[in-house]
Image (cartoon, helix red, strand yellow):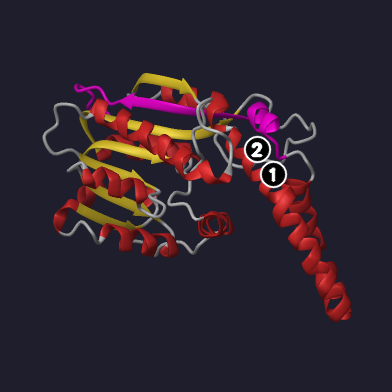
């Protein structure tokens, strides 16, 4: 198996957010009118997201005695642990050593062959060693994998009639329009491109639910935390450093000026808002099925 990738800056941000905010998951929350938008409710909103995935997975696995599930991009293993608690056999995959270590600690509560953790990229999985599965699930991990690799690898990992559950965001047609906020949110495959790839694949689309407005309040919550909490703390620290270490601070500010400018635009310009997210991203829950009579690979 190829050497797992180093932890990326994006993964670092996710882990730091988890540690600073005291939550179990690395994904967005699912917000409805009965749940007030607040940091104290973030964990509950994230669990609602997980519950939706678990209910969706349970629906497609109905009738399978001991389902075999592949959890791609398992994060800290919180969702995988909840699937294991249902008696499912779970293979969790993470390309990050740090995240894999966190997941391994959590999955240690499920000894034996019920839980398996692989430190690898999805693209590098060997179907002869890991599959076939009754379900492959992507929880905010689909966006990181090239679509040709996704649709090329999936058929070999799935049993005939098995399913794929995807919960992630995609780029809308507005992406690249050059308007304020266009570059505030990275990631995600173009939604139109995904539909084209899907149409050329052997998979059937069974469910396509737009969750954008239920997920986007997470952005509002994060934006408030960044502008009202983190930014003032950063200004205080900057003032201290300039007063006590002026030469070093000026040097570091000059060396990092381009990166700092990008960070300010992305996080503190006011463009990383709920409305901007809803314009440039489409957050979807998708269920695909490999037909029982499908024998061809892509």
Q: Is residue 236 left or right of residue 74?
A: right
User: Which quadrant: the C terminus?
Assistant: top left
The magenta segment is 272-298
Q: Look at 69% across and 29% down and name the residue there.
A: 275
Residue topped by disc 2: 220
At 14% across and 58% down in the image, what residue appears? Answer: 112
Q: Nearer the viewer, residue 166 or 110?
A: 110
Residue at image position (31%, 30%) is 55
Confirm whether the magenta stretch covers residue 293: yes
Residue 215 sits in quarter: top right
Q: Position of residue 230 (x, y in %)?
A: 70, 56
Q: Residue at x 53, y 25 (%)?
A: 33
Other-residue count near label 1 (Cα within 10 Å), few / some / many at <14 / 14–19 / ≥20: some
Q: Position of residue 207 (x, y in %)?
A: 38, 20
Lateral position of residue 242 relative to residue 39, left or right? right
Crowding at mark 2 (Cα within 10 Å: few <14, some 14-19, many 20+): some
Q: Which residue in the structure is indicated by mark 1?
A: 224
Q: Are marks 1 and 2 in contact (CB under 8 Å)?
A: yes
Splitting the image into 4 quarters, where does residue 179 fall?
top right
């Amino acid at each position: 198996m190829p050497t797992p990738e180093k932890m990326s800056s994006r993964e670092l941000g996710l882990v730091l957010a988890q540690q600073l905010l005291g939550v179990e998951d690395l994904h967005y929350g699912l917000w409805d009118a009965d749940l007030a938008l607040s940091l104290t409710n973030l964990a509950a909103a994230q669990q609602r997201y997980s519950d939706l995935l678990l209910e969706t997975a349970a629906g497609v696995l109905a009738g399978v005695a001991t389902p075999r599930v592949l959890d791609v991009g398992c994060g800290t293993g919180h969702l995988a642990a909840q699937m294991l608690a249902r008696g499912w056999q779970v293979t969790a995959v993470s390309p990050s050593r740090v995240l894999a270590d966190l997941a391994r600690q959590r999955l240690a509560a499920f000894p034996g062959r019920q839980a398996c953790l692989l430190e690898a990229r999805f693209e590098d999985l060997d179907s002869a060693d890991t599959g076939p599965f009754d379900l492959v699930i992507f929880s905010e991990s689909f966006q990181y994998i090239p679509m040709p690799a996704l649709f090329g690898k999936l058929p070999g990992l799935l049993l005939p009639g098995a399913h794929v559950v995807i919960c992630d965001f995609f780029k809308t047609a507005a992406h690249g329009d050059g308007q304020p906020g266009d570059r505030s949110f990275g990631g995600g495959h173009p939604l139109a491109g995904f539909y084209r790839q899907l149409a050329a694949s052997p998979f059937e689309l069974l469910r396509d639910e737009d969750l954008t407005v239920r997920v986007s309040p997470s952005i509002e919550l994060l934006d408030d935390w960044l502008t009202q909490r983190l930014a003032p703390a950063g200004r205080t620290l900057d003032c201290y450093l300039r007063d006590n270490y002026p030469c070093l601070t000026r040097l570091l500010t000059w060396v990092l000026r381009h990166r700092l400018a990008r960070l300010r635009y992305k996080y503190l310009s006011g463009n990383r808002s709920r409305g901007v997210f809803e314009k440039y991203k489409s957050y979807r829950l998708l269920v695909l099925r490999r037909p029982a009579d499908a024998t061809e690979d892509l």
